[in-house]
Image (spheres, rainbow, N blue to C red):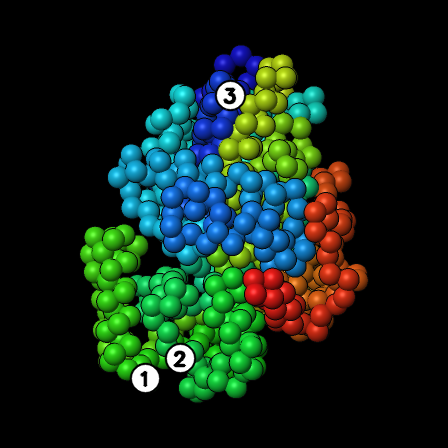
Amino acid sequence: MKGFPSQIDRVIDTDVLVIGGGGAGAGAAMGAARRRCRVLVAAKGRLGRSGSTPLSSAVVAMDGESARKMGQRRADPSLTPDRWFEQIVGHGFFLSEQPLAQLYVEQAPARVAELLGWARRAGQPFFFGAGGSWITTGRAIGRSLCQGIRESPPIDLLEDVMICELTCSRGRISGALGIDIYSGELVYVACRAVVIATGGFHPFSFKCTAGDNTGDGIGMAFRAGAAVADMEFLLFCPGALFSPRIHRGSILPMFLYGTGQIRPDIVDAKGSDLFAALPAEVRRLAQDPAWFKLAHAFIWSEALAAGRGTSAGGLFFDFRRYSSWRYFKGLLLTFMVFKKFYGRRFHYQHRSVRDLFDSIRRRGRWEVGLCCEYSLGGVVVDAGMQTAAAGVFAAGEAASGTFGATRTSRALTEMLVQGFVAGESAAAWSKDVDDPAPAEDRIEQACRKVLAPLTRSGGTAPGPVLETIEAIADGALGVRRSAGALEKGLARAAALRREILPRLAVQSPNRRYNLEWIQALQLENQLFCLEAALRAALRRAESRGQHIRSDFPHVDNGRWLRRLHFENRGGKPALRPRQPSFCCLSPPQRDFPGVLDYALDRRRQETGRLN
């Protein structure tokens, strides 16, 4: 292979490389292919079956007015595009980039309608819910996306390949280096444009999403010259199961509680109800689907911070006062949903949950906790999904800016909209530039970096380092944060980067299906994202979204109506506050005592407009 280092086993040439096999990646591939470009999708796993898409709660949405025009009689026509846009920006504490929120609202109807068409032709179940939403399963989303790929112009697939590093030449992207996970071969993809669609960054030990949300695309894009932002903002799911262990991380309790099918008491370790003493308006806020996650995360984290949690750091869904009538009513509703989606009454996400329903019948308890399900932070993009790195685009959870400080709208809709736009933009870019000249020295440098853990002896194994990263996140990056914990976590993370990362080594030099090697290569990205999140959380001396500072509980719009960008300055992240675009809606001019006060104020305004 002339012009390439000897370590490279395969070279592939394409116009647009899409990194990621989930919804954003599939959308980007189809968007680029429709512009008559050569497109290659590289995924760690299988297209439509890897990443967080198969595990998602699987709701896609558009505004109710558009859903009504599509023939959905139960759609809410008062949920107009303008009102939906106002909700997204307002619920995000006005940190949304409003052009991105506009793009989301404007293109959602077309993208969701297209997905529903693929689903029908693939025989996948989608059912209309409330407002302008359709409910399905993660697997149905994946199969529908695969149907869309089959119906698109030709798209090449590179499955079970982890892209590790982007390479640049003459100031723009020239390719990417990856590893075939099963064979261990080094694969180089020469391309004119890249779309990062690799998902987010979930650094905690307790997980309710796929374990490979390691921030790979975010880290690679930054090293290529892109900026990242909003890393302090994470979305926590209230109600993921701690035990029994076979169900650990399942979001079934949140699904049942949030949809109103089963509503037990939520109690602390001593059996005290978390909501009984709260004002009625706060209890109503906690039942509002738009504010459900924010209100519960705030109230749960307050109880946990006060030492009222279980030994595992959880709370209980308590069924001791659950009447037989409520049980059988909830069971009937749940069985109807399970039968539609999974074909069997006691199956959720294709796993038996009979034991959980038996415990409800026996008036038992479920131990549940707060679990990170989505990261608001990611690569900074414009309305064309272009980054500051020439030829690099980003979409979906790997990008940032649409939802601001917290998300109440649907991430699956975001991945569809942004994926298609990123693919179209990458295709247009690739047609305007010449073929990149391979930078052999940079490719060789990337090869040495990727192969280094295999050749070191006496170094540090990646497993304990990953456990340390998770412990740092558990101790400092939960919903409730403080300067002391953040400073301690940041010092530990920086020490890992300086002292341990350069010494990572794996036990076996065999490159075939060496998952320890893969884990070692992910750690650089995980550490970068962790440090950025800790630095931003420490810098943001206020509370906003699910970033709750115990030492700064108020929402400070006067000083902190800013996004925190990390720009690449000579390879090092420089933190710069940047004001988001207020092109359509002006932000509130006053501060609020806390995030619940802000949420209550927004809810009053929204309710008042409807009345």
Residue farthest right in this picture: 558
Q: CA distance from mark 1 to mark 2?
A: 8 Å
In the picture, measured across the screen, residue 592 lies left or right of residue 12, that is right
Helix, strand or loop at label 3? It is: loop
* Viewer-closest of 478 and 94: 94
Helix, strand or loop at label 1? It is: loop
In the picture, measured across the screen, residue 515 lies left or right of residue 236, that is left
* Residue at the image position 50 percent from the left and 14 percent from the top: 1
Residue for badge 3: 35
Circle number at residue 23: none
Helix, strand or loop at label 2? It is: strand
Q: Are marks 1 and 2 in contact (CB under 8 Å)?
A: yes
Question: Of label 3 and label 2, which has the lower sequence position?
Answer: 3
Amino acid under disc 2 = Asp
* Residue at the image position 55 percent from the left and 33 percent from the top: 421
Residue 196 x, y percent position in the rendering: 54, 36
Q: Residues within 10 Å of mark 2 (few under 14, many from 20)?
A: many
Circle number at residue 265: 2
